[in-house]
């Protein structure tokens, strides 16, 4: 269930476009380690410099994130790309080779100096390292910096703290984590709360239809129909910000009712507005509490302890003994002569149950009659049954803490989140949900997955095995779960987990990781309570913007569409210099959320009123943009 596979390629060497006498061999398929020239693209013949042409970008990796990143660079930013894949015939290698805009595809098992030379890193504008371990990516980044000082480097790294140190070491480097970028969207989807991006002290999120408030920042999508998401328009062309506010006002105050599909109800009699639901960007006031009340948690903790250490017959004996102790306490209260009241009765009852009974002696003063003495004997013998159970619970709890092995899911595991797959994404999702205080249970088939140790270190129970997924989900108590998050690297396995969970508990919230867009659209249309996310779809825009030297603050998902939140600095002579917010928003794909004037850089001026003011060098703008919109603005 892990998502760390890289294939088993063969190493070799080659240059972009091939050497002067070897272009035909590269174009005709070549050998392992050679270049595959893409039909219709530059680099089919000529020397290395001619093949690379200079000014190109290098993407190293054959996984889904590398595939999406190349799509971003070639389609949105329209820049030439040279791909270095571990195996042209496995994973996303064939799909990458078929992409238009890719100058060449090189096959190298690792990104060595030989691979960098073949990709002509000396003349490249940037390099993205999307595959390999943290150590391999850092080694490749240092090698690229040595060959081309100042080249833009973006690398995928799991250890974010290590990435921060690397960014200080290499001035033109950005170390990003794809799983860290995408995991909050999966976690928030499971918790039923909006995914947010922090900007200027505000937590921005996407609200839909009836959740849209009057103080929203801007309209981000319309024509939303869950049964046909191809109709959705993200940041469409606008006739002015006032038009968006009018549409939202019609929805909020016009009495129009929306059906389950997001379309207006025909019975409302309104047909002037375009059909479909709306989505708007607004600030989150406060996050709702997630944890169960303390009383319920104590109740299920006690029941879990009893079920863990006792069987059904022993539990019946303990319940009977407890009832006898309570009855004996009532008898003591009625047949003793002390004047201590109810508190003293409880005190004597607890001491008798613990075996600290003080018997009456003939000839001395006694505090009760024969009924009281009989009750005292009954309480003492019944209390003996509780001592071994209490001792076992304490010893097992202490021993489990020392071993570091969390207890398997039990009666107290309720309203929890089940995470299927402990790769990079699953590990981060489990940690994020655990940080909220909600219980988490993880399922993993690979006993060598590195996320198992990380989950157990947090006290999260992990179920490991190759058994039927249905049995594992039942063992994880899916019938009492709040949500199921399936984040393996296999779309089919994730869908299987969703369907098995839905069969046991139809109302459970389900979030699945899906790469294929068409597959995801069919899932949306068929399964009402299933949300799909794609790690590569969420993370690739941030990697592409970082490679182009732009700062993306975060990504928000509008179903399968990605909304980028970015902050841009107006530089002299750039495409932003001299333009106003209306110019930027007019063609669509961009909404200006806030402006930070060069004379007041600490203040975020939200929904900047002076839309005719032209931007000057030193100004900063915060925008919500589509991938194409961001590419248009920064070029």
Image (tube, rainbow, N blue to C red):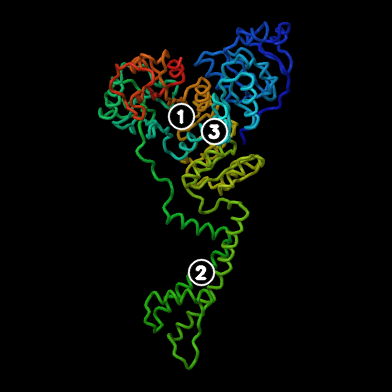
Q: Looking at the image, is 229 positioned above or below residue 47?
A: below
Q: Which residue is mark 2?
A: 320
3 vs 1, front mark: 3
Q: Which residue is mark 1?
A: 554
Q: Which residue is mark 3?
A: 164
From the viewer's perspective, is 260 left or right of 474? left
SS at mark 2 in the image: helix
Gap between marks 1 and 2 measured at Cα? 59 Å
Q: Residue at x 42, y 56 (%)?
A: 295
Residue 492: percent from left, percent from top = 59, 31
Q: Residue at x 38, y 43 (%)?
A: 288
Gap between marks 3 and 1 measured at Cα? 17 Å
Residue 237: percent from left, percent from top = 36, 16
Mark 3, Cα crowd under 10 Å, few <14 / some 14-19 / many 20+, is: some
Pick the front one: 304 or 161: 161
The N terminus lies in which quarter of the figure?
A: top right
Q: Quadrant of residue 283?
A: top left
Residue 535: percent from left, percent from top = 53, 29
2 vs 3, front mark: 3
Going from the N terminus, do you reach mark 2 or mark 3 first?
A: 3
Q: Looking at the image, is 483 positioned above or below residue 546?
A: below
């Amino acid at each position: 269930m892990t998502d760390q596979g890289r294939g088993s390629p063969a190493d070799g060497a080659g240059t972009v476009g091939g050497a002067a006498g070897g272009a035909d061999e590269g174009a005709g398929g070549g050998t392992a380690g050679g270049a595959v020239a893409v039909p219709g693209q530059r680099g089919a013949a000529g020397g290395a410099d001619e093949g690379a042409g200079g000014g190109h970008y290098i993407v190293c990796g054959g996984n889904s994130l590398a595939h999406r990143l190349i799509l971003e660079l070639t389609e949105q930013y329209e820049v030439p790309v040279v791909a270095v894949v571990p195996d042209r015939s496995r994973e996303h290698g064939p799909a990458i080779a078929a992409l238009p805009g890719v100058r060449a595809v090189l096959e190298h098992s690792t990104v060595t100096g030989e691979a960098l030379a073949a990709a002509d890193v000396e003349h490249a504008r940037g390099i993205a390292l999307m595959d390999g371990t943290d150590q391999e990516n850092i080694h490749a980044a240092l090698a690229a910096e040595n060959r081309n000082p100042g080249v833009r480097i973006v690398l995928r790294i799991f250890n974010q703290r290590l990435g921060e140190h690397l960014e200080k070491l290499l001035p033109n480097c950005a170390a990003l984590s794809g799983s860290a970028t995408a995991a909050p969207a999966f976690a928030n989807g499971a918790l039923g709360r909006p995914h947010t991006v922090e900007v200027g002290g505000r937590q921005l999120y996407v609200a839909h239809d009836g959740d849209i408030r009057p103080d929203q920042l801007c309209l981000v999508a319309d024509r939303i129909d869950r049964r046909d998401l191809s109709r959705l328009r993200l940041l469409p062309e606008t006739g002015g910000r006032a038009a968006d506010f009018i549409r939202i006002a019609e929805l909020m105050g016009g009495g129009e009712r929306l059906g389950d599909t997001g379309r207006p109800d025909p019975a409302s009699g309104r047909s002037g507005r375009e059909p479909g639901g709306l989505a708007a960007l607004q600030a989150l006031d406060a996050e709702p509490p997630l944890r169960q009340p303390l009383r319920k948690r104590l109740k299920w903790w006690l029941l879990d302890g009893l079920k863990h250490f006792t069987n059904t017959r022993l539990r019946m004996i303990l319940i009977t003994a407890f009832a006898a102790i309570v009855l004996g306490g009532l008898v003591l209260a009625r047949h003793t002569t002390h004047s201590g009241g109810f508190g003293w009765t409880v005190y004597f009852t607890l001491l008798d149950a613990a075996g600290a009974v003080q018997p009456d002696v003939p000839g001395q003063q006694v505090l009760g009659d024969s009924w009281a003495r009989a009750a005292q004997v009954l309480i003492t013998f019944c209390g003996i049954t509780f001592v071994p159970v209490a001792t076992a619970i304490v010893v097992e709890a202490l021993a489990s803490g020392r071993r570091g092995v969390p207890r398997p899911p039990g009666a107290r595991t309720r309203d929890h989140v089940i995470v299927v797959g402990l790769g990079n994404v699953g590990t981060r999702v489990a940690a994020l949900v655990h940080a909220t205080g909600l219980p988490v249970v993880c399922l993993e088939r690979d006993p060598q997955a590195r996320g198992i140790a990380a989950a157990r270190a947090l006290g999260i129970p992990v179920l490991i095995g190759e058994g039927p997924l249905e049995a594992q989900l039942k063992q994880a108590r899916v019938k009492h779960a709040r949500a199921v998050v399936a984040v393996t690297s296999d779309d089919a396995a994730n869908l299987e987990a969703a369907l098995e969970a839905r069969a046991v508990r139809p109302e459970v919230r389900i979030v699945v990781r899906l790469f294929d867009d068409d597959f995801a659209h069919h899932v949306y249309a068929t399964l009402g309570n299933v949300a799909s996310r794609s790690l590569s779809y969420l993370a690739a825009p941030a990697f592409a913007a970082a490679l182009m030297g732009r700062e993306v603050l975060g990504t928000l998902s509008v179903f399968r569409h990605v909304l980028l939140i970015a902050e841009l600095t107006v530089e002299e002579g750039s495409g932003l210099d001299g333009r106003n917010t209306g110019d930027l928003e007019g063609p669509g794909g961009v909404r200006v959320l806030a402006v930070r004037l060069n004379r007041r850089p600490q203040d975020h001026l939200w929904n900047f009123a002076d839309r005719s003011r032209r931007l000057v060098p030193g100004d900063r703008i915060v925008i919500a943009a589509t991938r194409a919109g961001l590419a248009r603005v920064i070029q």
